[in-house]
Image (tube, grey):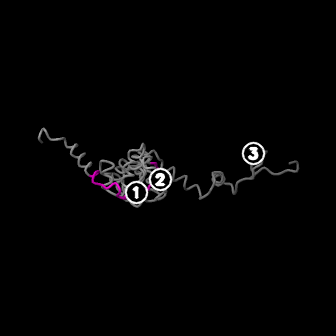
Amino acid sequence: MNKNSPPQFFNIKMEIKGVFNMIDKNKMVKVINKFNGTVGYDVPEMGVHRNFYPKESKEISFEELERLSFVPGGDVILRNYLEIVDEDAIMALFNEKPEPEYHYSENDIKQLLTTGTLDQFLDCLDFAPDVIKDMIKDLAVELPLNDMAKRQAIQDKLGFDVTKAIEIKNTKYDGETEEAIETRTSGRRAVPIKTDNATAAPSGRRYKPITKNE
């Protein structure tokens, strides 16, 4: 290399900058909310306030995404919760190619959980954006994930106990209250009627009997 030549990283930066400059600011880019909740942001310079509902996709101008990337927290939203479905726009905004996990779908994660190798799974836990990690936790309970090595990897890297979450899920029916769970698991047939002066039931009885003096 000629000693007067710019370093390699400079050439890469210039190349990326070239991509950035070549993108029409009015170009519409597909953006998907992969988060299991609403994602919202403001771009004050453009007077924009936008909400994405779960799984919702929108066509957003590149200029809006560019300006969002400079808003505090905007880069985190773009990298971790919203998926930009345009490789040139991603290169321009992130200054790098995203990891493959950035584009993972729910079906990809299910495949990874059920048939993927442990090394593939560990790479995903290391390189995936936060929204993919959240999906991994949810799907590990929903499927459920039977691979104990992968369960342990989730606990080690994400601090989430899949086994415990599955146990809780299996002891709770849809719409069931915590009080109802306690009743069912205690052997009772129903939640007892409560009174302000209720006392502990005598041994052998299901509930304190009503007497004539009460």
CA gap between label 1 and label 3 equals 63 Å
Residues rendered magenta in the picture: 19-42
Q: Helix, strand, or loop for circle 1? A: strand
Q: Which of marks 1 and 2 is nearer the N terminus?
A: 2
Q: Residue 207 has which mark?
A: none
Estimate the x, y position of residue 198 in percent, counting from the top left: 77, 46
Q: Mark 1 points at which residue?
A: 60
Q: Are marks 3 and 2 in contact (CB under 8 Å)?
A: no
Q: Do the residues labelled 1 and 3 touch (CB within 8 Å)?
A: no
Residue lying farthest to the top in this orientation: 3
Q: Residue 99 or 209: which is nearer the viewer?
A: 99
Q: Residue 178 or 95: which is nearer the viewer?
A: 95
**Horizontal relation, residue 122 to residue 206: left or right:** left
Q: Tell me the residue at 27%/48% (across/down).
A: 17
Residue lying farthest to the left in this orientation: 2
Q: Please, what is the three-letter code of the amino acid marked with disc 2?
A: Arg
Q: Mark 3 or 2, which is nearer the eye?
A: 2
Q: Residue 200 has which mark?
A: 3
Q: Mark 2 points at which residue?
A: 50
Q: Please, what is the three-letter code of the amino acid marked with disc 3?
A: Ala
User: Is disc 3 surrounded by few (<14), some (14 to 19) or many (20+) residues within 10 Å?
Assistant: few
Q: Helix, strand, or loop for circle 3? A: loop
Residue lying farthest to the right in this orientation: 213
Q: Are marks 1 and 2 in contact (CB under 8 Å)?
A: yes
Tell me the quarter of the picture where residue 28 sits.
Answer: bottom left
